[in-house]
Amino acid sequence: MSNYLVGLSAAILGNVVIGTGQCMQKYGLNRLQREWDTRRAFQMEGSSNSAAAYPGAANPAGSNHSLSSSMYSSAVDIRSRSSSTAAASQQPLLHLGASSKRAVGPRPRYTSKAWCLGLLMNYAGEIFGNSLALSYLSASVVAPLGIISVIVNLILAERFLGERITANQRFGFMVIMAGVGCILLVAPRKSAAENAMQFVDAVANSGVLGLFGIVYVVQAALITAIRKGHQSLFAYVLVASLFGTLNVMASKMLTMFVRLRLAFGGIANPADIAFYGATGAAEAKPLVFAFTGPQILAAVCLALSIVGQESFRQQALGRYPVMEFQPVFFATFNVVATLAGLLLFRELDGWAHAAVFFSVFFAGIALIVYGSRFLQRARSVELPSHIRLQKDNLLGHTKMM
């Protein structure tokens, strides 16, 4: 029970840090957007003054277009209020009048110190929070707790960024917490290994290479289909979820190895065990410094999984509204990561426990998805026809709270 509480505390604190980092990123993006709005206003004012000084050079149609664009510029710049506004920040702004040959959007987000600090907080929460928690807990516990970061982000955004939490959102909070509570009640409380020998046995007999191979084949097929134009919300969600699952599994194995190595010493690295078996891993030779080939490959796979998940997640957020993407992604990621963890580490105690767990788990996921729909409510912005025709130049899907 003490290990369970340690892992649970690490996951909760890690997600609080992640939610704070997401709010910090949103603050940095808002500052960049305000800076760009101010600069664009001066450019438009200068363009208007030039047209007034040289009326013969002004194009009436272009002038009317510029005026209409000015009237609706606030609508064009509206984006969904969410923890994932970083995706929209990379899309180009609508070209306006004389400024079309100049800068077409805010400065890159990495130029904002606040955004960079928020990004560091995200990774710190993942590494020192969720990854540490995975060495004590099942992925079926850690993954659903990720919703805490969303809730923390919304609460801080209301307090410091002027966003308002509605009655519907408060109701969503209650439903989500009920769903998370259901999962925590039935989730396995035992770790994948309580000692070094159990850990070696779990990794050596888990078939991790076969599972990872299947995941990579499925990902390659999905990515190829997306690249050929067969794009859908679920395709993006599934690719991002599979990358996230690989990240969770690799993090769980590596952090558990570090924790048990410090406690017991002398155990083989899980990457070597997966390649060579429990016996051959003890004889693995270092390839670069103190790292063997499988260890290096495991680190590369972990890095690629992180990059891949974020890349396809941001692509999806650039194409679909947040309120459509987030609940589907959260549910899919939880289901895939949980199933992978249970298959690899055999954390359920027999068929009876499995039946009860999956019944309550999917009920909890349903509650979380239902509650998530109340966290971000948006309505479409009706744009004039001359702006609607240029929708490809807009900041993704234009939404307002």
Image (spheres, grey):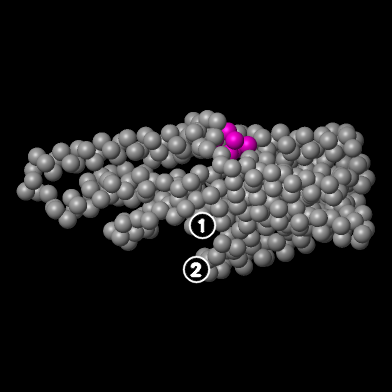
Q: Assess disc 2: are there few (<14), some (14-19) or many (≥20) residues with their C-alpha within 10 Å of its C-alpha.
A: few
Is 355 on the left-hand or right-hand side of 139? right
> Where is residue 115 shown, x and y percent of the image?
51, 35
Is residue 200 magenta-colored?
Answer: no
Is 227 on the left-hand or right-hand side of 33? right
Is residue 156 magenta-colored?
Answer: yes
Type of amino acid under label 2 = Gly
Q: Nearer the viewer, mark 1 or mark 2?
A: 1
> Where is residue 9 shown, x and y percent of the image?
77, 34
- The quarter of the displayed image where residue 257 is located: top right
Is 203 on the left-hand or right-hand side of 106? right
Closer to the chain start, of discs 1 and 2, is 2
Foreground of the two, 106 or 366: 366
Q: Residue at x 38, y 40 (%)?
A: 106
Q: Main secondary structure of the magenta part?
A: helix
- The quarter of the displayed image where residue 385 is located: bottom left
Q: Residue at x 52, y 30 (%)?
A: 160
Q: Which residue is mark 2?
A: 229
Location of the N terminus (image quadrant)? top right
Q: Which residue is mark 1?
A: 320
> Where is residue 312 shown, x and y percent of the image?
56, 55
Residue 167's mark? none
In the image, farthest residue toward the front: 167
Q: Secondary structure at mark 2?
A: loop
Mark 1 to mark 2: distance in Å?
15 Å
Identify whether 91 is placed above or below 226: above
Type of amino acid under label 1 = Tyr
Stretch in magenta: 152-157
Foreground of the two, 42 or 384: 384
> Do callouts 1 and 2 mark residues in contact (Cβ within 8 Å)?
no
